[in-house]
Amino acid sequence: MTHTPARPLPRFPEGFLWGAGTSCYQVEGGVHEGGRGESVWDRFAHTPGTIADASTGDEACDSYHRYAEDAELAAELGADLYRFSVAWPRIQPEGTGPALEAGLDYYDRLLEALSSRGITAVPTLYHWDLPQALEDQGGWLNRETAYRFAEYAALMAEFFAGRVETVHTLNEPFIHLALGYALGTHAPGRTLGFEALPGAHHQLLAHGLAAAELRARGLKVGLAHNYTPVRAASSAPADIAAAHAYDTLHNRVLTDPLLLGEYADLSVFGFEDAPEYVHEGDLKIISSGRPDVLGVNYYNPTTAAGLDPLAASTSPLSLGLPFELRGVEGAPVTAFGWPIVPEGLTEILVTLKQRYGAALPPVLITENGCSTLDEPDQDGVVHDEGRIEFLDGHIRALHEAIEAGVDVLGYVVWTLLDNFEWDQGFEQRFGIVRVDFDTFARTPKDSYHWLRALIQDQRSGSAG
Ligand code: GCO
């Protein structure tokens, strides 16, 4: 039984694109194949106590061998786009040197599997799996890593030139920095707190340097960031100040340099002028990499409340700054405990348009989805009504943003397959296709069939 929308979904603009996404460490497996080097996620996941179910991405969804099945699932879905990421350690095992032929061969097979089915590949060069050898030299806290990334991007630009239109450089640099370097709940597991901030700048510098390499070979450039509308817990000045500080930290620190060529007001973090790690010319390099497409990952809004400056914040993403981050009062939550607020997608897209105006490139929703407690029935089929409701609400909210004048190119659901959800291992299932992690069998859920019907309706013009 598939979900029948209470009211017909609105009609999206002609040429609007639909797709599904994954990332390499979360789905590929094959971590010792083709000469692949060690990544920070291999090291971290094999460190006892880091992953909720003590699993690793060693096999994940075995997409290294089953990529054609994944391409077929995307084709059956009716997807225009398939977003995936390239494992840097498959191309440069130690993060430097010539490209490994076996690594390129894998992505060649994947590109062929997609193009032969009429699916446009949307590759991301970096979805958090830094070569461990570079982490051993400081990782993103070492400015040199930005230059290693540019060299890697040049190799991949040669490979993708003429085969794809747009290459995204980074996925969610803020979350990678916050969880990987400030909090330590993600790889590489460093707990630097606010001292991790230079890692944000070095990732932006890496993007700017890489964008030049991509464009030199005729490729368009993208970057995906996860955005969250930040609301003050109350009208109290401390709460309003906390919301401003977190909005700046989460949404603006990684976007203003990219789109405006300058940092937002960093005095909220105690900086009176540009921090010493921002070198002369950096902002020019970063803003020269203003993307042709801005990837927006959206999951939920955030509520911020002020704290006594002496109180130590217990909110993970506050990086130890004096504010508390909360959910959204009264909102239902996903299996992951994230608030479900579809209108937050409209809100953040309209905010981006108001904030950046003509500097805002066309947007692609590069991630939106949810984890649900998926229990297969006796036939192994998951009737994930909750996920269908989530997608229905967010797709409607997206249409409202388009109606409000936001230029949105398409919607890429997170995610095609249940996969390795970072420190949660396989306990949080975000897929529209269920994966049996013993057999790697893929079984479309009701949400897959619902989305497939939606895409067909949009294509046939019968929606709206
Ligand atoms: C992210 C990552 C994805 C996650 C997804 C669910 O946005 O955190 O890009 O890899 O799996 O968002 O957490």
Image (tube, rainbow, N blue to C red):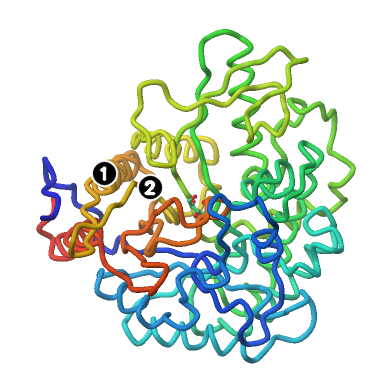
Left or right of 183? Residue 392 is left
- The residue type indicated by label 1 comes to Gly
* Helix, strand or loop for disc 2: loop
Which sits earlier in the primary sequence, circle 1 or circle 2? 2
Residue 63 placement (x, y as % from top left): 46, 76
Left or right of 177? Residue 368 is left
Residue 306, relative to residue 7: is it above or below?
A: above
Question: Which residue is painted at 25% across and 60% down in the image?
Answer: 445
Question: Which residue, given by chain and number where applicable, does mark 2 sit on?
Answer: 370
Left or right of 292? Residue 48 is right
Question: Which residue is painted at 71% across and 54% down in the image?
Answer: 204
User: Toward which corner of the image does residue 390 lie, by quadrant?
Assistant: top left
Question: Which residue, given by chain and number where applicable, does mark 1 sit on?
Answer: 386
Number of marks present in the image shown: 2
Question: Which residue is painted at 58% across and 23% down in the image?
Answer: 243
Are the residues at dot 1 and dot 2 in contact (C-beta closer than 8 Å)?
Answer: yes
For the residue with label 1, is its CB less than 8 Å from the closest atom of ligand 1? no
Residue 38, relative to residue 263: is it above or below?
A: below
Question: Which residue is painted at 31% across and 59% down in the image?
Answer: 432
User: Toward which corner of the image does residue 381 lie, by quadrant?
Assistant: bottom left
